[in-house]
Image: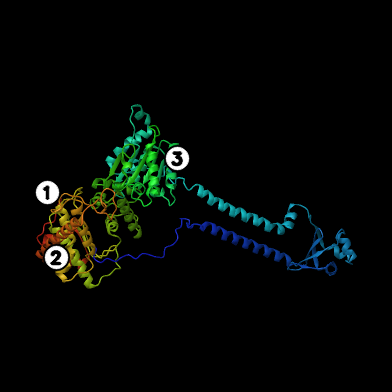
Amino acid sequence: MALFNNDKKEDNNKKAPVTKAGKSLMPGGNFFGNLITALLVFMVIIGVYMLIAENQTKSQEISLSELSTDINKGLVDEISVRGDDLQIIYIGTAKIEKIAKKEAGTALTSTLSNYGVDKVKLEGVKINIRNQSGLGYWILTLLPYLFPFIFIAFFLWYMTRQVKGAGMQAFTFGQSKARITDPDDNNQRVLFKDVAGAKEAKEELVEVVDFLKNPKKFLDIGARIPKGILMMGAPGTGKTLLARAVAGEAGVPFFSISGSEFVEMFVGVGASRVRDLFKMAKKAAPSIIFVDEIDAVGRVRGTGVGGGNDEREQTLNQILVEMDGFEPNEKVIVMAATNRPDVLDPALLRPGRFDRRVTLDLPDRSDREEILKIHARGKPLGEDIKLAVIAERTPGFSGADLYSLMNEGAILAAREDRKKVTQYDLIRAIEKVMLGPERRSHLLSKAEKKITAYHEAGHALVASLLQYSDPVHKISIISRGRAAGYTLKLPLDDHKMQSKKEFLDDIAVSLGGYVTEKLIFDDLTTGPSNDLQVATALARDMVTKYGMSDKLGPVALEGSGGAALFGRGVDEKEYSDRVGAVIDLEVSGIMNEAHRRAEEVIVANRKLLDAIAATLIDVETIERDDFEKILVAHGVTPKKKQDIEHQV
């Protein structure tokens, strides 16, 4: 139970969204980025060209008379003749180069002889005649003049390409964004053996697989497979995984898309994407279309602010038309997943559309053990691993929670440089998934530690002595997540229903810490705030949802999500202000009665309370076995499984 709640601060410095590659998704970001890149490339090329041109102009140009004098002095090593250009290399450790111009139409030797060059000295100079014709010559000659034009042409082509790409994106705006899973891709293929639990759901879907593999058997006898299959269940129960398993077993293409990907700010785009998606699926038939979180687009119509022009409603209308337009031999099956089937439009659920509904419940103990075995694949497990024990300690965990549990256990083992995952790692991972990581650096003062110990001892004491509450498995005053301490109580066996007596005991247990602080310290802290919120919400649900109020009787006044029934708005109420006042009185009465019962238990067992709190202050954490020893020492018999079965 949370004792000290610290509100999380939101970061107001929001950044522009980026892709995985780090590219900005803001409009115009790519265009201006490419423009700046092109300008930088242009500046670099100009700089390199100017550097080369500058290096070329550093060679000193001399006259023919100076060249003749240097030859007579024996300073010249080599002369290269390229047309009328002379390149002179002088003798020395540093090869000094100079350039000169010879007389046009006259041989170099004749010209130098006319300038009085000694023939003997001239014979000692290497004279190379280089061909000035050819492609390379013309390129080097014309490049300084052609380069600006070439670059301008390249720049215009590059920018035109970017604009064209943006234009093409506009033309593809209405195309489907569905992700296609190839049936031959073994890396992404999922089979029924990869999905543990959900036995009834898999039985419902086996005939769908059979139809996709052998549709003739059904069509010959006049049977028509359901066109739409709606997967319903709590988050993390494996709806998407089971849909992929159907496609994997049937060996057909799997088109998956989220309901939110249909809806855009422009009216008609979602409907266009629906048409494109069904068109692709029909071409690839037999195939499966899977729409995840269909409630994003399939909510009850008539509540949108845009009326008939509302984009979401237009998209939903197109889905209804496409599903109702199937032929029996189309061999395209639509599967969808949602955890809010109560908000879907009735037209989606009528026969001929999503007329088959598959419900996925949270896994029971045996299913949790099978799921843990699947998620344990590829992980080196220690000899002390007992997945059955882990399954017993995780009631209410979904398949996604169990995956996270196994992953966190492996992370804990790797963090401590161990090669195998042990049972202790998985036990710690359970608490990490449920409550968050330990915060041992969050040190409490002596006064806060004492308050926290008595607070959690109050929860544990009331839970142990009330008949219909779950037994305590662990008590700790080590901070986890946002809780300064917690009392972990788990049922000894899975049960699908809860009774009114169990609810009343749970509320009393939630108020155990609140009552203890008042009795022991004659004061209250902010610690019980979360306990009060949970208890009050449960009491209100008893009155408004479950018909457990003596004054109001068997009346459901709110839906499962807290909103009014039958698709009405959240702020609308199905009851009058007078009934609302009765609800408030009933909730207050339940809370006061729970407070009285918790106070009676704590006052009557003060010595046991002090013993639990003292042990917590000393060791900080009490496991189930040690806690039961404290109970036995004070004459309290711990709860056993047969006691729970007797209550039922």
Does residue 132 appear to the left or right of 548 in the view shown?
right
Q: Residue at x 40, y 44 (%)?
A: 256
Disc 3 marks a residue whose amino acid type is Met
Circle 1 sits in a helix, a strand or a loop, which is it?
Answer: helix
Residue under numbered circle 2: 609
Residue 615: in sight, yes or no? no
Task: Give the Cα distance between marks 2 and 1.
Answer: 27 Å
Q: Earlier in the sequence, mark 2 or mark 1?
A: 2
Q: Position of residue 622 (x, y in %)?
A: 20, 62
Amino acid at pointer 2:
Leu
Which residue does the numbered mark 3 point to in the structure image?
280
Residue 257 sits above or below residue 17 on the image: above
Q: Which mark is residue 593?
A: none
The mark closer to the camera, 2 or 3, is 3
State the CA–CA distance, disc 1 to disc 3: 58 Å
Disc 2 + disc 3, Cβ < 8 Å = no
Query: Residue flagged by tag 1: what amino acid is it?
Result: His
Q: Which residue is mark 1?
A: 646
Tell me where residue 220 sits by quadrant: top left
